[in-house]
Amino acid sequence: MILAVSLSSFAETPVKKHGQLQVIGTQLCDQNGQPVVLRGVSFGWHNIWPRFYNKGAVKTLATEWNASVVRVAMGIQIEDNYLENPEFAKQCIETVVKAAIKNGIYVIMDWHAHKMHTQEAKQWFGYFAQKYGKYPNIIYELFNEPVNDSWESLKAYAVEIINEIRKYDANNVILMGCPHWDQDIDLVAASPIQGQKNLMYTVHFYAATHGQYLRDKMVQAHKQVPIFVSECAGMEASGNGPLNMEEWQKWTDCMEAEKISWVNWSLSDKDETCSMLLPRAKATGRWTEDGVIKAYGQHVKDNLLKYNR
């Protein structure tokens, strides 16, 4: 047992293994140009579940759940959001980012909005890139789930934010959402953003709602543009209802076959299917008490242990 613990302390972390990520063609690759698939967990909205934004939770996801990436969902809506309380948001996000760097995993900084806030996003990503862009752990997600914005307006938004990030960080990967809750990836494939490197586009799915039609659309689009599934889960798009294990496995098989990275939603404790933990779960991780990880969370953990070998 002592030997196992000793060996685990020297285990190769995802960032040590893959290094500076890059996009080659439509594929996320490591520093040597070899394909990479990241798999991990998204934290819930920082302004609703700030208690989980701590180094213990990150360490547990990295070392016990085998996540190679975590995603911080910086809320731009609902009360106490970043626009209303920016210092608290920075504190939450930076705590997780620092812990991810320490544990050698990748971290997605998600601007968790459904409406466009160009100047505020530009200011935040500029700050974040200037402070953390030197670390290969960092991935930027510019816009979570646009709803009513056209792809042309989203392209203009993305270019403005990308240009700000690239003032300070020339290399780290950037993710950009697409119209209609990250469903209309076909619009992106037909007219991708030009002149930018290490840029990927996000698709989101909830397996009990989104079936073969969206998988087909994603696979077809993946022939033209690089795709990253930055949010997904096994239940309905509402975040509730029963898990559809058959459809969820079809999605997983599809993403693995396409070498598309995926992140499951979410590390939270709400009374809904997509929250991975019960309210009595400790904020700081481990989650070894009987039943404190809900059924969905246990499936996520099992999948991470299975696929992130």
Image: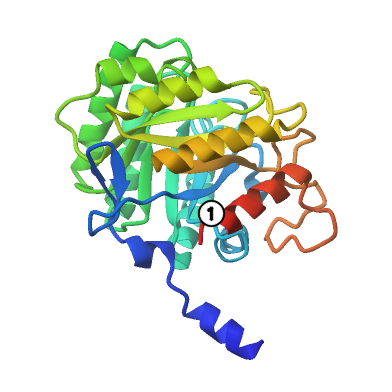
Side of 183 where 290 appears, left or right: right
Amino acid type of the residue that numbered disc 1 sits on in the rendered structure:
Tyr
Callout 1: few (<14), some (14-19), or many (20+) C-alpha neighbours within 10 Å? some
Please report the residue visible at 49 percent of the width from the left and 20 percent of the height from the top: 214
The one nearer the camera, 83 or 10, is 10
Image quadrant where residue 211 sits: top right
Q: Give the residue at mark 1.
A: 307
Please tell me how many numbered marks the rendered image carries. Answer: 1
Image quadrant where residue 306 sits: bottom right
**Whole-percent x and y of residue 276?**
71, 44
Please report the residue visible at 31 percent of the width from the left and 58 percent of the height from the top: 135
Q: The N terminus appears in which quarter of the rendering? A: bottom right
Side of 112 where 168 appears, left or right: left
The residue sitting at the right extreme is 290
Question: Vertical placement of 116 versus 263: above or below?
Answer: above
Question: Vertical placement of 283 versus 219: above or below?
Answer: below
**Whole-percent x and y of residue 301?**
65, 53
Q: Secondary structure at mark 1?
A: helix
Please report the residue visible at 23 percent of the width from the left and 59 percent of the height from the top: 32
**Whole-percent x and y of residue 20?**
28, 57
The one nearer the camera, 12 or 212, is 212
The residue sitting at the left extreme is 195
Image quadrant where residue 12 sits: bottom left
